[in-house]
Amino acid sequence: MIKIKEKKIDSKKVEDGASKDGAKIAIKDVKVWYDDFMAIKGIDMTIKPNTVTAFIGPSGCGKSTFLRLFNRMNDYVEGFKMEGKIKLNGTNIYKDKINVEELRKEVGMVFQKPNPFPKSIFENVAYGLKIQGIKDKKILNERVEKALRQADLWTEVKDDLKKSALALSGGQQQRLCIARTLAVEPSILLMDEPTSALDPISTAKIEDLIFELKEKYTIVIVTHNMQQASRISDYTAFFYIGELIEFDKTKTIFTNPEKQQTENYITGRFG
């Protein structure tokens, strides 16, 4: 369940491998403005738990703006205004009483470029846990190891946890950032073009990781890579100039889209 009005993590409780489900995201008539510019034009969508949903569309079409609504990252943008409802497991995250800090523990974010802190590998992953007040070394060690294993990085770094995260390769840094996000046990994982700065081998590792993680998390990914969307996602949403043109199972979008605009985009006729 989503709990964003109170502390979610009990420092005395350590998961023993049991998983919780990802969250359901229900979007109803969502509109976004930056001052007078309307960036999102009345979108309705339901994202099912424990699925991978890809957002595709040309640059500037509103994909990242829409993605960042789910953890209220747009709140920091000057002139931002939003109308409509976004519910995570039934909780409207744009109500005044929502604790945004708690929301962002439930809705993790991985950015386009790896952004590890200038700290050790261990301290990067433990950072969010320590902020939440977890001080027990045994719990920290277990949670850090679990997150690094989930991010498929443990075997590569287990003997170098005190090494600076900045010494890792780009692909390793991105998996470290995923581990850092997973350590606080979110329900939803947002990814904004997480492989665009990586080489093909690192990209393949991240894609394999996404496929595995959907067993425990709801994953939403923005990507410009059509092949990537078709490989890793269960559902695909095609955006164009702030509108949701089509949203369906990925196989349907890529083999039998309903809208001509969608077909034109995925076949490379524009965009």
Image (cartoon, rainbow, N blue to C red):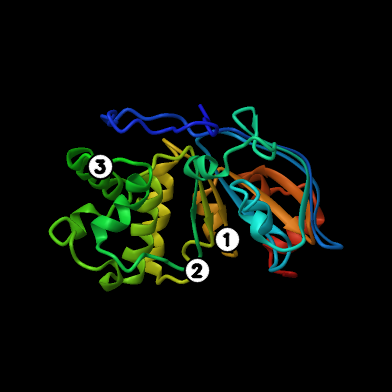
Outermost residue, right direction? Answer: 36
Q: Is residue 206 shown above or below 250? A: below
- Residue at image position (12%, 59%) is 159
Q: Nearer the viewer, residue 213 or 259?
A: 213
Q: Residues within 10 Å of mark 2 (few under 14, many from 20)?
A: some
Query: Viewer-nearest of labels 3 and 2?
Result: 3
Residue 198 quadrant: bottom left
Up-down relation of residue 189 to residue 95 (above or below): below
Residue annotated with mark 2? 196
Kindly identify which residue carries mark 3: 135
Instruction: State whether residue 19 is above or below residue 209.
Output: above
Q: How far apart are labels 3 and 2 at the CA level?
A: 36 Å
Q: Do the residues labelled 2 and 1 touch (CB within 8 Å)?
A: yes
51 or 163, which is in the foreground?
Answer: 163
| N-term-proximal mark, 2 vs 1 | 2
At horizontal 36% and vertical 65% (from top left) the residue drawn is 117
| Left/right of residue 215 with respect to residue 38 in the rendered view | left
Of circles 3 and 1, the one toward us is 3
> Looking at the picture, how far across and down is residue 253, in whole percent?
67, 49
User: Whole-Å distance between the Cαs marked 3 and 1?
Assistant: 37 Å
The image position of residue 213, as x and y in percent, is: 40, 43
Task: Specify the amino acid type for callout 3.
Answer: Lys
- Residue 223: mark: 1
Question: Counting residues from the N terminus, which is met first, the one under dot 3 or under dot 1?
Answer: 3
Residue located 56% across and 43% down the image: 234
- Residue at the spot x=27%, y=69% of the render? 168
Local secondary structure at mark 1: loop
